[in-house]
Image (cartoon, coloured by chain):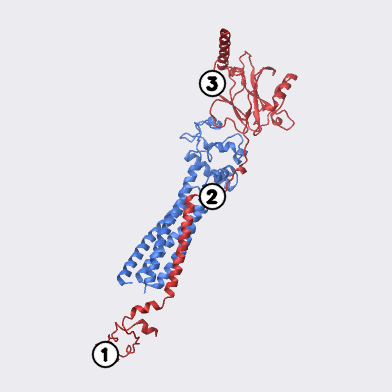
Amino acid sequence: MGAGALTCLMFVVVALNAIAAAAGLALFAVAIWVAVDGYKLYPISGVSGKDDIFAAAWIAIFTGFAFFLTCIFGIFAALKRSRALMMVYLIIMFIIFLFECASAITAATNRDYLVGNSNLVKKQMLQYYGQDSIQGKQITQTWNRVMEQVECCGADSPEDWILYNSTFKQIYPTYNWPLSCCKRLSSFELQDPAGCKVGLTSTLFTKGCFNYIESVLSRYTWAVSWYGFSVLMLVFFTLVIAMIYFMQLE
Amino acid sequence: MKTNTVISLMSLMSIWMWTGEGQIFQPELTSNAFLAKVTSNTVILKQPYCVFNQPCPGCEIWLVAGLCSANGTFDALVNSSTTNILSLSPYPTAFNPSSNNFFLTRVGLLSDFPCNQYPNDRYFVVGADGICSGVNCNGVLPDGSTVCFKYLLIDANRTLINSSNWSGNITLPKLLPLQTIYDGLSARSGAMVVITTILCVAAALLLLLFLIMLCVTCCRPTKKDSKQISVMNSIRIPRYDTHNLKERVHPYDNPAYQSDLKNYSTSSTLPKNGARKL
């Protein structure tokens, strides 16, 4: 290959590595956002033991930063036109590629288990809401906050509390559903306690909370999974060009 | 004939209008759209306005709540013994296997439910006291049973004055145990399938390309040297004049052949790497 073409290829490799470094850093930032869990819905996945979305986010934090560092090293190796450095770069990038693949696949798969339909969330709510264990307290706090802020009740509707036996029903047999389902005034008092107790639809929230929970967990998943996928496609292309460059060296 | 049918129709219509005006003579479910109108162990009824239209100072309206299969039992007990029917079947043991399967609970004073008012939004919850222990407390009904209700007019001496009809059968839904919810995997989303397949293919391709690249770079020693030698009669001449001779002096050149052949001795035509490998 002529010297001019080789220089051109070197610039292409350097440019692609620069873009991949930026993309890796952005993946690092997005994965930190997921791991921080601003919507505070971690107990819903943690209590069932299906918190792989957050595990994948942790992996993506490390691989994103590793992509950033390795791509900068790749720029240096390409500029130096050194075969050994390029080989090291290719091996390290391949290893990080495999880890990031694992992260993206794990997040997407786990999301299906967790929020494919409302059954798991509903069963967890009925089992743990009001229970006196650590998981019970976490779930109770999470559901109370979601029901009050999002203005919803139950997983699909308030009838979840009536149709199924639940820990809440055993502890408070005279209440049909938790008081968080009731509409409140701006002073946080209940708007109509008696009406909420019998189910007057103007005094309690009638939509289910599952849509909100599903949208938040899906948002986390797509952040890790789809963005990780797009970074991987860019890195795949970069590595193919880098391999061609490696073959043309010396 | 025609006048007969007309008269009978008119009388039927007047009876229908008279009954439609508000003289319900049995307990009924509330007409409000409450979400908890009929749960697995509670029922919400209308308040007994205008059920008993007779003057009766100090009288109270009581409710008989029990399994529909116990309607006959209650009626027989009422007919046979008129002494203190209010303690016939105390709530705590009312629904035991060998018990009467009904209980009585107080709704309110007759004077609280006059006939000239007819608020349709007032309701009465059967089972509001939960699992209670009083004799006539408003306890919950058995889970998933078919229940019937009846109003009784009781006077101050605790004797039965009047009773309404039995209500229709009300079937309570059975409470589902939460273990019946199947929380396994429902379906795989399309996105997950796409991501998994494409990433697996990409990783495999990358590995394959990497191995091909390693094979190609490590196993092609001959290709490189063929490019360097560009003369017709290619003879590799090792350079013996590197150490103690200046670049310009090439004593191994035969000036007689300089015009015919290419000048091997200049550094640009001598094979560099090939010479070293020898």
Q: Which mark is on residue B119? A: 3
Q: Which mark is residue B257?
A: 1
In the image, taking residue A140 as reference, residue B92 lies left or right, namely right
Image quarter in which the N terminus of chain A is found? bottom left
Cα–Cα span, label 2 and label 3 = 50 Å
Both marks 3 and 1 on one chain: yes
| Residue B81 point in image, percent of width and height | 75, 20
**Residue A36 visible in the snapshot:** no
Q: Chain of mark 3?
A: B
Q: Name the chain letter of the residue that bears numbered label 2.
A: A
Please tell me whether mark 1 sits on a helix, a strand or a loop: helix
- Label 2 residue SS: helix
Q: Decide: few, some or many residues near mark 2? Use Cα within 10 Å; few <14, some 14-19, many ≥20.
A: some
Respond whether the residues carrying marks 2 and 1 are from the same subunit.
no
- Relative height, residue A5 to residue A169 (above, below): below
On screen, A197 above or below B72?
A: below
N-term mark: 3 or 1:
3
**Most foreground residue, B68 or B162:** B68
Q: Amino acid at mark 2?
A: Tyr
Chain ID, blue in image: A
Residue A97: where, in percent of width, then height? 45, 62
- Would you say A215 lies left or right of B49 here? left
Label total for image: 3
* Mark closer to the observer (2, 1): 1
Residue wearing tag 2: A113
User: Chain B hue?
Assistant: red
